[in-house]
Image: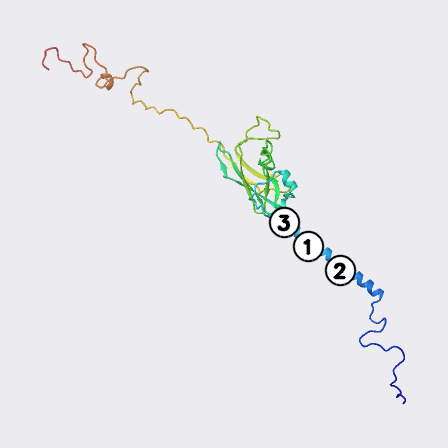
Amino acid sequence: MSTPRGTRPPTGATPVQGRPADGAGRPTSRTLRVRRVVALVLLAVIVVGVVMLVKAAIAFGTGLLADEPQGKVAPPPPQAVATGGYKKCEVKDLTLGLTVSKASYADGENPSFSLTLTHVGRRPCFVDSSPASLELVVTSGQDRIWSSVDCPPAKKVLLMAPGDAYPQTVDWARVRSAAECPADLPAPGAGDYSAVVASTEVAGLTSAPVVFTLLAPPPPPVETPPVTEAPVDGAVPPVDGAVPPAEGDPAATGETAPADGTAPADGAVPPADGATP
């Protein structure tokens, strides 16, 4: 019996159901190289991301630790500040205010100034807050009268956190000063003066000027001579040391007593002794 034409199975091995033919579905070498490159790139991206996340976490933690003091801890010495990573304050971190206690001062009254150093930055920083670095200058016109840095005290390094304010008072003894503190300088006189404070450590940090007046001493009192009574018309002022006449004495009435045997001035004859008038 012959097999119908078109239905005879092909010669050779018959493929098994579900199994690909030899070489079918196997990745080529080029595909394998591309996959390896993609895997390496993904691994590098993951490593870089992890490193960046670690650095960001460290920076965030450092910022929290830097913001923690808020002015509630004692400022460390300058060496500890430098090793701790704190920076020096800049002009954008600080403001400096100045006020004067009165508009005018009487003779012998010393002017008093109030300085306020305020931190307005975002991170703690350190600054010298002593009069050696916060220079208060008193002038009269173009004449430089006095400066707090001519005879400065010791430095005072201050660690300031955001929002901190440091007020201090500076008194001026109404004297002149110059570099190296020379003695016997002439005292400033009465008149109008102005004062301003500026930092010698932070460039550009200065206050607005204030104006005040030193009053002149009051004039000495005028001595007036003692008041004396004017003499009575016709009366002769007594000689120094003379005793004034008593009441009833003829000299007190301006009349002269008649001498013995002399008739009175009005022509009357006095009665004789024993005679009846």
Between 125 and 215, the residue placed more toward the observer is: 125
Q: CA distance from mark 1 to mark 2?
A: 16 Å
Q: Relative to 20, is 191 above or below?
A: above
Relative image position of residue 171 (x, y in whole percent): 53, 35
Counting residues from the start of the chain, the first of labels 3 and 1 encountered is 1
Counting residues from the start of the chain, the first of labels 1 and 2 encountered is 2
Relative image position of residue 269 (x, y in whole percent): 15, 14
Mark nearest the camera among 2 and 3 is 2
**Disc 3 crowd, CA 10 A, few/some/many (<14, 14-19, 20+):** few
Q: Mark 3 is on which residue type? A: Gly
Residue under label 3, please give it. Answer: 63
Relative image position of residue 207 (x, y in whole percent): 58, 42
**Disc 1 crowd, CA 10 A, few/some/many (<14, 14-19, 20+):** few
Residue under label 1, please give it. Answer: 53
How many marks can you see? 3
Between 103 and 68, the residue placed more toward the observer is: 68
Q: Is residue 154 left or right of residue 45?
A: left
Q: SS for tag 2?
A: helix
Q: Mark 1 is on which residue type? A: Leu
Residue 150's quadrant in the figure? top right
Q: Relative to 213, is 273 above or below?
A: above
Q: CA distance from mark 3 to mark 1?
A: 15 Å
Whether residue 200 appears in this view of the structure is no
Q: Is residue 39 left or right of residue 22?
A: left
Q: SS for tag 3?
A: helix
Question: The C terminus is located in which quarter?
Answer: top left
Residue drawn at 64 percent across, 38 percent down: 79
Residue 96's quadrant in the figure? top right
Q: CA distance from mark 2 to mark 3?
A: 32 Å
Counting residues from the start of the chain, the first of labels 2 and 3 encountered is 2
Between 63 and 216, the residue placed more toward the observer is: 63
